[in-house]
Image (tube, rainbow, N blue to C red):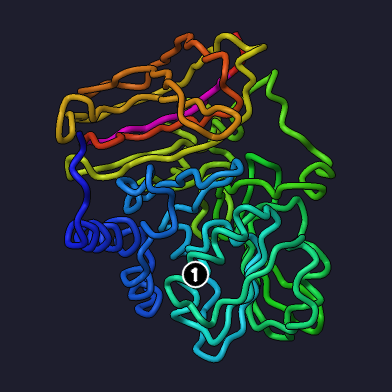
Amino acid sequence: MAKAQTKADRERLRNRMVEEEIVEAGVENARVIEAMRRTLRHEFVPRSQRRLAYHDMALPIGANQTISPPFIVAYMTEQLDPQPGDRVLEIGTGSGYQAAVLSRLVRDVYSIEIVPSLGKSAAKVLRRLKYKNVHTRIGDGFLGWPEAAPFDKIIVTCSPEKVPMALVDQLREGGRMIIPVGERYQQDLYLFRKVDGRLESEALRATLFVPMTGAAERRRERQPDPLHPQVFNGGFEQVVGEDELPEGWHYLRQAKVVENPNEAPNGRRYMAFTNEEPGQGCRALQGFAVDGRKVSQLHVSFQVRGKEIRPGQDRTQLPYVAVNFYDKRRGSLVSGLVGPLHGSFEWTREEATIDVPIHAREAIVRIGLLGATGELWIDNLKISAD
């Protein structure tokens, strides 16, 4: 039987999360870092998930929704540049965690949730924890909160295909909005600034957010095809933002796109991973749709090169191309693995066929050293129904 976590255990885990998954990942705003350190994430997840509350991962919270990973919460909060006098509108209350973090940094947070059960649960938790400057309601977040507008900042924690016009209208002149925009599994985080009544945009990085529930999701012009699963930008030729991060790939750790047509086995670019500390995160992820009732196997192929790859803290921490499957409630199923990879070797082609569980409706492909040490280069990753 697993030992229950004490208050001291959670404080230790929370401090480690902040240092390893937020500060080391590049968040610099001291106020945001302190807010992440003081906000009790375990209070916003179901009891069955509390042992995982201080890991940098999305966790199911019911109604097919998840709580965002801590790094994404901290990163989006930092990009908003929160000020003590700000009034902030949040679209997608979810668990209430993002609103709780913001409440420590701004004057008022107005948060809307479209799923009644989640909206009621989050409001109850926020009241219990005495977040008195967080105001909640249940409704269509893409309509905003007109009677409380204008807002200094707007944060959208669910993914629309396009920026809703109501939110543009309710953002004050000079205000900021951060929002994940795009197709369901290929989204980019955008920072918008309102200048002369119009939005000026800056692409930040690829991300993966739960899509909006309801009519907005059904009206998407492009829907995923779970009968023809595939990886987007598996050659890493397309990049986004000033840092040239790979489009379609998210939650990068110790990973970068290298442009060198003389070394790349295909095209001009490939992905490079480097890790010197055993067990440290070193990865990139991408989600896609797959229907296990119709697709029984996936064919996975890629080109890879390695240098001095050694196991991390134990023999399980070695690089694989891992495909993790999830059911319709986003519950975790089995994983398909291609690998492991170890030692030093020149560019070589790897391929394998993996089984798809019948209950699978989504999957996430994970690449990188995954806790191992050394250097790893990957290019031309492809996934298709076998």
The residue at 57%/56% (across/down) is 94
* Along the line of sight, the residue nearer the viewer: 45 or 326: 45
Q: Amino acid at mark 1?
A: Leu
Quadrant for the C terminus in the image: top right
Residue 374 falls left or right of residue 162: left
Q: Is residue 375 magenta?
A: yes
Q: Residue 37 at what x, y percent from top left?
A: 31, 69
Residue 191 visible in the snapshot: no
Residue 157 visible in the snapshot: yes
The residue at 75%/74% (across/down) is 145
* Along the line of sight, the residue nearer the viewer: 263 or 370: 370
* Along the line of sight, the residue nearer the viewer: 65 or 304: 65
For the record, the magenta segment spans 374-383
Q: Residue 207 at what x, y percent from top left?
A: 55, 49
Q: Main secondary structure of the magenta part?
A: strand
The residue at 44%/58% (across/down) is 44
The residue at 54%/32% (across/down) is 235
**Residue 26 in which image quadrant:** bottom left
Measured along the vertical axis of the image, is residue 175 above or below residue 16?
below
Residue 220 falls left or right of residue 127: right
Q: Residue furthest bottom?
A: 85
Q: Residue 168 at what x, y percent from top left?
A: 78, 72
**Residue under circle 1?**
126
* Along the line of sight, the residue nearer the viewer: 31 or 253: 31
Q: Is residue 384 magenta?
A: no
Q: Residue 306 at what x, y percent from top left?
A: 29, 27
Measured along the vertical axis of the image, is residue 62 above or below residue 127?
above
